[in-house]
Amino acid sequence: MLTAREPAVLVLEDGRTFTGRAYGHRGTTVGEAVFSTGMTGYQETLTDPSYHRQVVVMTSPHVGNTGWNDEDDESGRIWVAGYVVRDPAIRPSSWRSRRTLEDELDTQGVVGICDLDTRALTRHLRERGAMRVGIFSGPDAERTPADLLAQVTSAPEMTGASLAAEVATKEAYVVPAVGEKRFTVAAVDLGIKSMTPRMMAERGIEVHVLPATATAEDVRALAPDGVFMSNGPGDPATAEQQSALVRAVLGDRTPYFGICFGNQILGRALGFGTYKLRYGHRGINQPVMDRTTGTVEVTAHNHGFAVDAPLDRDSDTPFGRVRVSHVCLNDDVVEGLECLDVPAFSVQYHPEAAAGPHDAAYLFDRFAELMERRATAHATQEVSV
C-alpha cells in the first residue's frame, strides 16, 4: 500500500502557483526554476555542480525508475536546490540500484514536489523565462500565499551570482593518466564533473585539478602541456579572475580547452560579451552542429548563459582571429569557439557524456592533438637550434 504524501506547493516569483505532494525531504527550498529535457541520467544531473542553486523541473513524466546507485555520481553530493517531478516511480527496477531516488533526496536534504502538471510548468517557464521559485512542503505549505511569495522574491537572482568557488575543490588533486603518460594538464575546477578528468586520463593525460581561485602563477608552476576550464554554476560576468587566467594562458600560447562555463570564460577573455538565456538549455538531447565538419551531434547541456559572438564571420580579437565553431540548431546560440591564431577552443555543452550521448567525445582527442602539435613544434625548434 502506498504511503500518503503530505501536500506541497510550488510558487514562482511571478505569483503562479502549483499544488502537488511532498517528494524527497520535507521543508522549504528556493532557487532558480529551470527545466531539463533528459529522459534518463537523473543521477548524473542531480550531482552536477553546475545545478547549484537551481530547482530542476523534469519534463520526462516518470522519474526514479532506476533508483540510485553508488557509481554514477558526478561529484560528492547532490547540488540541485530542489526537484520537481510529475510521476515518481513506486519502486526502482535496476540491478545496480542500492536505494530509491526519493530516499537519497531525503537523506541529502533536497526538498522536492511531485504530482503536479510539469507540462504546464515547463510551458510557463518557456513563455516567461527562468525565474526564482520556492517549494514548500509539510507545515511550511500551510503558510499564507503572500508569505510564501515574499520568501521567493527575496531570494538572490542568478544574474550576478558568483558561485564557482562554492562548488569547486578547496585543495588541488591529481587524476593519473591511464597507461603511458603523454601530457600534463592543469584543469581549473569551476564545478567539474568526475567524468571529465577521467576522459582525459583515458587519453594518457595526467590531470592536475586546481581550485577555482587558481592563478596564472599556479598554472605555470605545473609547466602543463595544456590548460582546461570546466563547467560550473553562476554568471560568467563575475568570473574576471578566471578570465584573466585565460588571457595569460592565451598569451603563453599554451593549448586551452574549455567546456560550458569554460567556454563563456574564453569568450569573455577574447573580448566577447555574455548574456542570460531566456530559459536556457538543459538535458541530454540538444542538437548542435560542428561547423568545422558539418556534423550534427546530439549533446548534453546545462547552461543559462551564452557567449555573444557573430555567427556570420570571423572576429578579430587581441589574440587573433576567432570563429564560432559550434551552433545550437534549435535557436542559433553559440555552442563553441575556435581560435585560429592561438591553440585554444571551447564548447558550451558537455562532451564527457555523463549523462548523455557520446557524440562529442572526439573533443578530448582534439585537445590531445593540440598538445601533440605544440610538443612537436617545440621539439623541431630545439633540433634546429
Image (cartoon, helix red, strand yellow):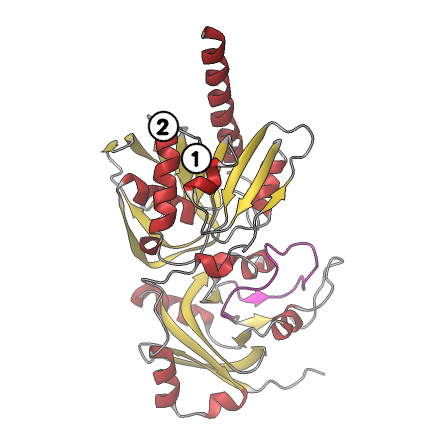
- 199 over 292 or under it: above or below: below
Marks 1 and 2, how far apart in space? 9 Å
Q: What stretch of residues is rendered in magenta?
A: 60-83
Circle 1 SS class:
strand
Q: Position of residue 220 (x, y in %)?
A: 46, 36
Q: How many marks?
A: 2
Decide: few, some or many residues near mark 2? Use Cα within 10 Å; few <14, some 14-19, many ≥20. some
Residue identified by numbered label 1: 256
Decide which of tag 1 and tag 2 comes sooner along the chain: 1
Q: In the rendered structure, which amino acid carries the disc numbered 1?
A: Tyr
Q: Quadrant of residue 381?
A: top left
Is residue 377 shown left or right of residue 342? Answer: right
Q: Position of residue 309 (x, y in %)?
A: 27, 42
For the N terminus, the image quarter is bottom right
Query: Would residue 172 be counted in the magenta stretch?
Result: no
Near mark 1 (Cα within 10 A), the count class, few <14, some 14-19 or many ≥20, is many
Q: Is residue 181 above or below residue 81?
A: above
- Name the residue beneath numbered marker 2: 342
Where does the image place residue 232, in percent across and percent down from the top left? 45, 54
Which residue is nearer to you in this view: 385 or 124? 385
Q: Secondary structure at mark 2?
A: loop
Cβ–Cβ under 8 Å for marks 1 and 2:
yes
Side of 244 relative to 58 (left or right): left
Q: Given the current orientation, which residue lies at the most extreme top position?
A: 384
Magenta portion: prevailing SS class: loop
Task: State the mark number for residue 135.
Answer: none
Which three-letter amino acid code belongs to the residue tagged 2? Answer: Val
